[in-house]
Image: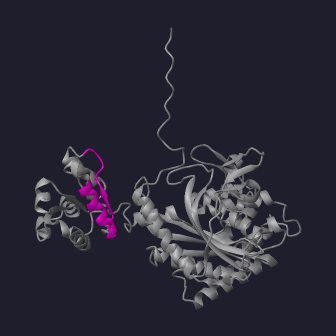
Amino acid sequence: MSKDKSARRPKAEPPKGFRDYFGAEVTERKAMLDQIAGVYHAYGFDPLETSAVETVEALGKFLPDVDRPNEGVFGWQDEDDQWLALRYDLTAPLARVAAQFRNDLPSPYRRYAMGPVWRNEKPGPGRFRQFYQCDADTVGSPTVAADAEVCAMLSDALEVVGIPRGDYIVRVNNRKVLNGVMEVAGVLDPSDPDRFAAERGIVLRAIDKIDRLGEAGVRALLGAGRKDDSGDFTKGAGLSEEQAEVVMAFMAAKRDSGTATAARLRDLVGASQTGLEGVQELETIAELLDVQGYGPDRIVLDPGVVRGLGYYTGPVFEAELTFEILDEKGRPRQFGSVAGGGRYDDLVKRFTGQSVPATGVSIGVDRLLAALRAKGRTSGAGIGPVVVTVMDRDRMGDYMAMVGELRRAGIRAELYLGNPKNFGNQLKYADKRASPIAVIQGGDEAAKGSVVLKDLVLGARIAAGASLEEWKSRPAQLEVARTDLVATVQRMLASAPEAPDGSAPC
């Protein structure tokens, strides 16, 4: 008789395209979100939290990766046969909220939102299917002053989190200008907006990938199509060489100044009224930013920005980090885009039937954190809690009392809860926790009413190569009265050198 096969054990790994976030990463993200929220709040925006799940009908079909299942969203049918999906961004849920509560919300309505979004896209190096966004939007304002404000706010947010001027640029364009160019190229008919819609969608996505695919790749997508390195084929827009050349000229229209760029765009849009309106809006945005001190060292007009999502109707903008990093093969490259947004005047209209102007920006928090790590401005690690070790199992109450006193003083602290038999393992645990100090009290110290404080940050610095001469004035450990525990730990934390990873004790 054959033996029954044992049940197959599940693989201890997340689904493809997903990842786990651990302590320091979560802490860093929260700190960054708090900094960005401070900027948004200073501009008068209020927080909003929406459901992670929306109806597919409410989300609409605006994802650029339309060749993926469910057109790029994670969707399913509920028990009532209604199609639901995880939100793919924070803008579509806002449109639903703005429509649902239009009689209760102030107009304009200014809100910011933060949280994870999910896209059923093809994963790759550094490209995940779940990531965090940090958005701010104004709903109900038709003036491009709202767009200019969002660009200024984005610039401020980047600088607050540690990206100085010179390491980023906010690039601004207008979809109306691109529509005017496509009208000239013969792929947009003002009398029949739905005509050539599929071709225009491909053109938008192609232009949006210029940094990744290069000119040759974009030309291929404007024409018959493109096959990538994996063999996957992406259908092209089917434009003729003459039509494609008009689009490529638009992408190369950036000049040394905003005025010169606008003049070149006027030439390209010809007699298109939509295109000329877009150029005028860009000029107004540039003027409004200039009077606030946001010059070309921070924000520029750039026709190369189109944004891939199909719901944008006017100005679009993108924040790009300009410094170089090394890719996985050790080759230098620019870090690229970390934020983007634009005007979407028709998104709320899907619910109400009435046009509601709106504009906003979304910051890719995970990419921004990765950029800071690449520049050494955040470590991906941090200082852990003070660890109170256990020398005598029968005195757990005494050790817990120490932990309680430290916590009440605002000091992050924990009691070692593993097997206390091997004291060396307790110190190894404290090292793995990146603890700055280990508190030790054996029987002899208890009898004297004292505790020993071991300086683990100093030990880590010496292990990392710091000279003993440099740190000889700072003892590796000291014994103090039990009653002085909290005050001494506070002094040690306040005077501690930076840890090897560059972080400071808290």
Residue 166 placement, left or right of 173: left
Give above or below for 328 relative to 254. Answer: above
Outermost residue to the bottom: 291
Residue 87 placement, left or right of 101: left
Rendering coords of residue 249 (x, y %): 68, 70
Rendering coords of residue 228 (x, y %): 60, 48
Is 464 in front, or is 8? 8
Rendering coords of residue 336 (x, y %): 52, 65
Give above or below for 318 relative to 420. Answer: below
Outermost residue to the top: 1
Rendering coords of residue 92 (x, y %): 70, 63
Scheme by which the image is coloured: one colour
Residue 397 placement, left or right of 448: right
Is 490 in front, or is 242? 490
Any part of residue 476 in sight: no
Is 70 in front, or is 423? 423
Give above or below for 397 relative to 279. Answer: above
Can residue 414 be found in the magenta stretch?
Answer: yes
Any part of residue 38 in sight: yes
Q: Residue at x 77, y 48 (%)?
A: 82
Q: Which residues are magenta?
A: 397-419
Residue 494 placement, left or right of 157: left
- Please give the count of numbered marks on the rendered protein: 0
Q: Residue at x 60, y 78 (%)?
A: 151
Q: Quadrant of residue 89?
A: bottom right
Can residue 406 be found in the magenta stretch?
Answer: yes
Give above or below for 236 relative to 44. Answer: above
